[in-house]
Amino acid sequence: MEKKYNVSTEAVSDVERVSATVSQNLKLLRRQNGLTLDELSRKSGVSKGMLVEIEKGSANPSIATLCSVGLFFLVRSLNRPGICLGRLNS
């Protein structure tokens, strides 16, 4: 007998796992960088309300929102002492 899958349930489960992971990682990154929600909001351009909802795991942020926050942390990490990107055009 062929095994049947409930795609809807599996998709919801995947979304919940991704949401929980994003929530945990954002909170961890923010705290490791010593930032308040207000500071991260100002510096990333994402509203404080959205950041709160993401950290609670109750928001489904757009890719653009995640990119804004991710780009902020990427630029911040590249501006730390000891980071050298080298020359792009030799």
Image: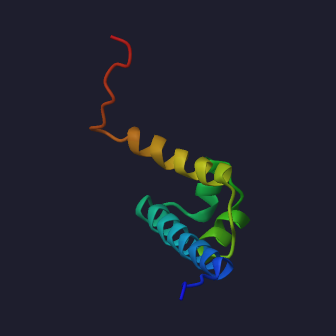
| Outermost residue to the bottom | 1
Closer-to-camera residue (83/39): 83
Residue 31 position within the rendered picture, expressed as x and y whole percent measured from the top left: 46, 66
**Which residue: 56% across, 64% down?**
36
| Outermost residue to the front | 1
Closer-to-camera residue (87/48): 87
Residue 44 against residue 12 in the figure, above or below: above
Residue 9 placement, left or right of 88: right
Q: How is the image coloured?
A: rainbow
- Toward which corner of the image does residue 80 lie, by quadrant? top left
Residue 90 against residue 24 in the figure, above or below: above
Residue 76 position within the rendered picture, expressed as x and y whole percent measured from the top left: 45, 44
| Outermost residue to the left | 82
Residue 73 placement, left or right of 58: left
Number of numbered labels in the structure image = 0
- Toward which corner of the image does residue 9 lie, by quadrant? bottom right
Residue 68 against residue 49 in the figure, above or below: above
Residue 81 position within the rendered picture, expressed as x and y whole percent measured from the top left: 31, 39
Residue 48 placement, left or right of 33: right
Closer-to-camera residue (61/3): 3
Residue 33 against residue 87 in the figure, above or below: below
Residue 19 position within the rendered picture, expressed as x and y whole percent measured from the top left: 58, 71
The C terminus: image quadrant: top left
| Outermost residue to the top | 90
**Which residue: 40% across, 45% down?**
77
**Which residue: 72% across, 58% down?**
47
Residue 48 placement, left or right of 28: right
